[in-house]
Amino acid sequence: MLEVSGLTKRFGGFAAVSNVSFRLAEGEILGLIGPNGSGKSTTFNVVAGLYAPTSGSVRFLGEEIGALPPAAVCHRGIARTFQIPRPFRRLSLLENVALAAFYGRGEHPPRAKAWEMAKDALALVKLPTHPAARVDGLGAAGLKKLELARALATQPKVLLADESLGGLDEQEMEQAADMLAMIRRERGVSVVWVEHIMGALMRVVDRCIVLDHGEVIAAGKPQDVARDPRVIEVYLGTDASAVQAVTDARVA
């Protein structure tokens, strides 16, 4: 569905991403991981249309989208969440998600249909669908769920999930990972999940791409990536127990 080839993004003389390539198959959950500053978010932002690539190609369903703005990327069926949620706090939960439903695919469905799509997305992530439910009072996990609901209301074919575990405790991380797996299962949405917290992610992804200093250093099945010497060196250090914990979690 999504093919990134030779992607490079420079800011002046600094190459934040250099010659990154990967493919996302239909129905797949692909993990894009690496330490802070590895180029994950830059890659993500190029795919989502926030940045234009310096060179390389981003193709979605055979169409080159590397030069398209974010709204056009969303209209074609690629939705994204943001690492730091910024909902419209003066609007209700339902209104926040209905806006995404109305504008997300560029088709402007009837108002009643947008409300229906919003309620469906909120119910899927287990947030209140009552028109009076407000953003105020949502904790970190609730705000992450609202981000997911807004993205899902655009009816995407591909979901780009950005740091969905940030700010969550261990139990909330497990729930967030399970929710992405459920979205793939119930909606048939393919997922690219950008994350630096490996444990929960490794339980649900089909494949992993590991970045360091803007370059791909490993790719493959989670259990193989977790044992890769370069990944251990740049991502986990020399803590062999951490590698074993990741592997055990995946097997479980």
Image (spheres, rainbow, N blue to C red):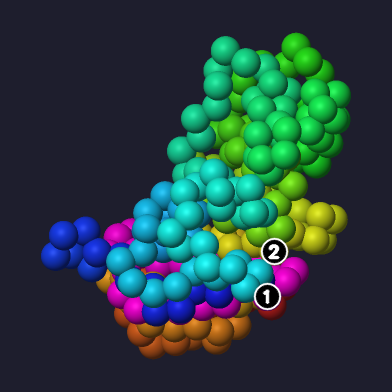
**Measured from the top left, where is residue 103 in percent x and y?**
65, 34
- Tag 1: amino acid: Ala
In the foreground, 240 or 28: 28
- For the point 55% across and 74% down, which residue is it? 3
Q: Is residue 163 visible to us here?
A: no
* Distance between mark 2 and mark 1 Cα atoms: 7 Å
Quadrant position of the C terminus in the picture? bottom right
In-image side of 194 versus 131 (left or right): left
- Location of residue 142 with respect to 71 vertically, above or below: above
Query: Badge 2, how many Cα within 10 Å: few under 14, some, many 20+?
Result: many
- Location of residue 70 with respect to 90 vertically, above or below: below
Number of marks drawn: 2
**Measured from the top left, where is residue 14 in percent x and y?**
18, 64
Residue 183, picture quadrant: bottom right
**Measured from the top left, where is residue 207 in percent x and y?**
60, 77
Please say if the residues under marks 2 and 1 sit with CB atoms less than 8 Å apart.
yes
Task: Report the residue marked by disc 1.
Answer: 25
Queried whether the magenta region covers residue 22, the answer comes back as yes
Q: Is residue 10 visible to us here?
A: yes
Task: Report the residue marked by disc 2.
Answer: 190
- Location of residue 245 with respect to 97 vertically, above or below: below
- Location of residue 80 with respect to 204 vertically, above or below: above
- For the point 33% across and 59% down, which residue is it? 36
Helix, strand, or loop for circle 2? Answer: strand
In the image, the segment drawn in magenta is 16-39
**Measured from the top left, where is residue 34 in percent x and y?**
40, 67
- Tag 2: amino acid: Ser
Pick whichever of labels 2 and 1 is earlier in the sequence.
1
Quadrant position of the N terminus in the picture? bottom right
In-image side of 143 versus 82 (left or right): right
